[in-house]
Image (spheres, helix red, strand yellow):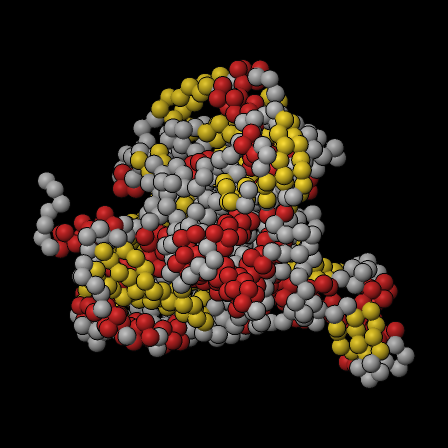
Amino acid sequence: MKISFLLNNREIELDVPSDRRVVDLLREDLALTGTKEGCGAGECGACTILVNGKSRLSCLMLAAQLEGCSVTTIEGLSPGDALHPVQEAFIEHGAVQCGFCTPGMVIAAVDLLRRTPDPDRPAIRRGLSGNLCRCTGYQKIIDAVEDTSRRRGKGKAS
Amino acid sequence: MKNAKNGILEIGKATPRADARGKVTGAEKYAADYYGDQLLWAGVKRAGIPHARIKGMELEGARNHPGVLAVLTCRDVRGSNRQGVIRQDQPVLVDDKVRHCGDAVALVVAEDRPALAKALDLIAVEYEPLPGVFDMETALKPGAVLVHEDNAEGNVLLKGELKTGRGEAALTECDVEVTAFFEVPRQEHAYLETEGGVALLREDGTLEIVVSTQTPFRDRAEVAKALGLDLEKIRILAPYCGGAFGGKDGITVQTLLGLAALHCPGRPIKMQWRREESFLAGVKRHHGRLHYRLGAKADGTLHALDAEIYYDTGPYDHLGGAVLALGLEHAGGPYRIPHTRLRGWSVYTNNPLGGAFRGFGVPQVAAAMEQMMDMAAARLGVSPLEMRLKNAVRRGDKNPVGVTLTSSTGVHECLALLAGQELWQERETWKAAARSFRLRGVGLACVMHGMGYGPLVPDCGNAKIEITEQGVFRIFSGVVDMGQGNAATYLQIAGSILNQDGDHLELVQPDTGKALPSGSASASRTTYTFGNALIGAALALKERIVRRAAALVENSGGGEDFTMAPGALVHRPTGQLIPLPQVARILDEAERISVFTFQAPVAAERPTADQNLQLHGIPHRIFSYGAHLACVEIDELTGKVEVKHYCAVSDCGSIINPQIVEQQIQGGIAQGLGYALSEDFIVENGRMATPDLSAYIIPTAMDIPDLGTFAVELPEETGPFGLKGAGEISMDGPLPALANAVADACGVRLFRYPLTAERVLQALAEKRGEGTGP
Ligand code: FES
Ligand code: FES
């Protein structure tokens, strides 16, 4: 079937089987391999993308569901070479080890910060609990998200 | 790889990792991200039965299915059809019989995944089921069902005995003796990137495999032998792994992909295990059964230890023998114990495959030994801390296998730092503040971890660094980065020596066609061994560059007058700047490359004459140390254990990048907490009962508290800038620290793990004298 949607701020139209998983469509048909697959069953969060601004698991979505949506993947999180503040904070705080969970984790964090203005550490932990990371023990990820939130708060105040 | 700008890379400075940017933007390509034009897909028919002979296979349906290019069995393998690091006992595709559910019986190559899935379905295998052996006691009985009929030792893959002093006989000389039996679970790696890769047989006959692996050079040799190929014709490329932790230490998809490529030349072929397949066929931390007897004198001095260790290695060696050997060597912990008898058995069964997993046999014995210490302390009426301080090794002491510790030995420093923590100082107040129906407890553990390969297998790094014509330093990494940050550390080492920033440094991921063999990414050795080699290579290159630059400046006064700067050399007396490309261009191609070999030193003593045990790694010379402290709260009504505070002090030598060391320590603790609290890869009659991440529970962000991590930076004099291994030590502490804390909270000790709510609740009920049913 033909579907059209906004992908990283660009209109695209594709002819794909309606039951193609979104994660495959992104990775294989569109070569956007920043979105990872860790389980294919909604258990790990590695495949998280933003659909109409909300985080969704692309391994559980089918192509047809994208019709008319706005999709953001890790590649489109910030324009050009610039990084999103969450990405900057992940680098600075050492929140990245093997990095396989990272794109999904960053997207989940962006969504969390959109939903929750000023999350404390327990709220960040809850907000990211759908995203597994096997390397970090999460602490530096929480540090990064907390710091992003803090800086954003400062930015607004000034 | 270009690196983020962050000034000159310096030793000892917390520096954001050079690989973080590519990973955080999604640009970094893992093996899973390689596809290729005209891609084919390969997949495996798994046995699904733990022990059976194959009577026949119906393959025609699969072969005739549209889109299927090849259906292959052991008959299509021209080499040894065997893989394995020490004992090659694992078939690429089953020939004689199936030995566990995850065995590969057939391989299919197809145009796309739907065709592949259908073809795998169409393969019908007729089995003659054989009685299986699913527990170690049964496996060791005379007349037991044999996993390998040709193994002279029956179901024993490796057994070993180490003895010091008067051994177990000295237990009779002790004033107190404590005895216990411990059972530790299988643990699944659960790295986020499952096993996978892409292979291509090129026209010139080169077989190229891009794969998520810890061991590209060893893989090359294994693929060659198993498939009957010329080693020179195989090239393995190892991008960053999306986690590995030991589970990619050895062959996963490599031989299968190679076989597929041989039958479908000219097109790239991809294999990516599904999560369930990864759980089914991947290796696990060994399930262990441990019998301990520990004796001490009335003054608290440890006197004798008798330990009997059994590890269920499943049907193949993988690295099961070496894992047992490291367990044996560490069975007595970081203590002076003059009389020991340590015996171990690595046992074949028809259970899932045991293998390498961060800690490599040590977490199991640390779980036992550290609880024995608490039990002995309780009997003697001294605190767990005093008990450890009294017996912990110092440099110059002999460890429990009788080897003199000649390198940095910081266990006392770790304990002292830990003892000063508020968590320890104020523990009684904290415990007393528990709300009603809550129990609080505090536990300690003290651990050591050997680094490198041991005495017989040369532990070598061969570094190669090049200055390009553009004046950029390119490092050819010989050891995989599976997330531990060694690649970034290599850049930091070279940057520091050559006084360069990230813009003038590049790292090429391990590629057997370009880098030099430097061993596995394992055994806490990656930065120590390759780092040492890289120092040598970088220093030699620097000297060469400076010498040649001197020739470019009139009356330069020789090399001493030059300093390196990012992208240039500075002639200090005149301030003249010579751009690096200018120097690079006057070097010929061979001169632009510098290589250096480092071989790790080995212990001078041999605690055993058994060559086989030595081959399996006994003894080590350099150890890292750690002291861990856990504060837990238990809900008396549900039995749930919550880790409220956790703190670890580590002696990993001097630190090159504090951020990376913290990552390693925190990550290891998190895996250790999972091992202690929730992770249990359950197997029933050889079949896994925890096939996915909803049944097998690894910690989420909700389950790990903020961790206090501290380092005592005792320089290791043989280490690069004083460093020693940091990759595994923190995995060894959490289970015993938590078990000791839970025992402290409950007043009763649990001997089986993980410490699930159910087990804790039952222990509490038994303590109160209530039965738990008929
Ligand atoms: S791959 Fe989608 S949740 Fe794991
Ligand atoms: S960094 Fe490896 S899984 Fe999160």
Q: List the single residue furthest toward the bottom.
A: B573
Question: From what the image shows, is residue B154 above or below residue B437?
Answer: above
Q: List the single residue furthest toward the right.
A: B554
Residue at point 18% right, 61% down? B436
**Label total for image:** 0
Residue at point 63% right, 52% down? A78
Whether residue B497 is visible = yes
Q: Is residue B406 left or right of residue B754?
A: right
Whether residue B534 is visible = no
For the C terminus of chain A, give its image quadrant.
bottom right
Nearest to the observer: residue B100 or residue A89: A89
Nearest to the observer: residue B637 or residue A110: A110
Residue B581 point in image, percent of width and height = 83, 64
Q: List the single residue furthest toward the front.
A: A157
Question: From what the image shows, is residue B226 above or below residue B178?
Answer: above
Residue B95 point in image, percent of width and height = 48, 27
Residue at point 51% right, 34% down? A61
Quadrant position of residue B736: bottom left
Question: From what the image shows, is residue B463 above or below residue B136?
Answer: below
Residue B534 point in image, percent of width and height = 65, 64
Residue at point 48% right, 22% down? B121
Quadrant position of residue B302: bottom left
Residue B772 point in image, percent of width and height = 13, 45
Q: Is residue B5 left or right of residue B489?
A: right
For the N terminus of chain A, give its image quadrant.
top right
Nearest to the observer: residue B774 or residue B123: B774
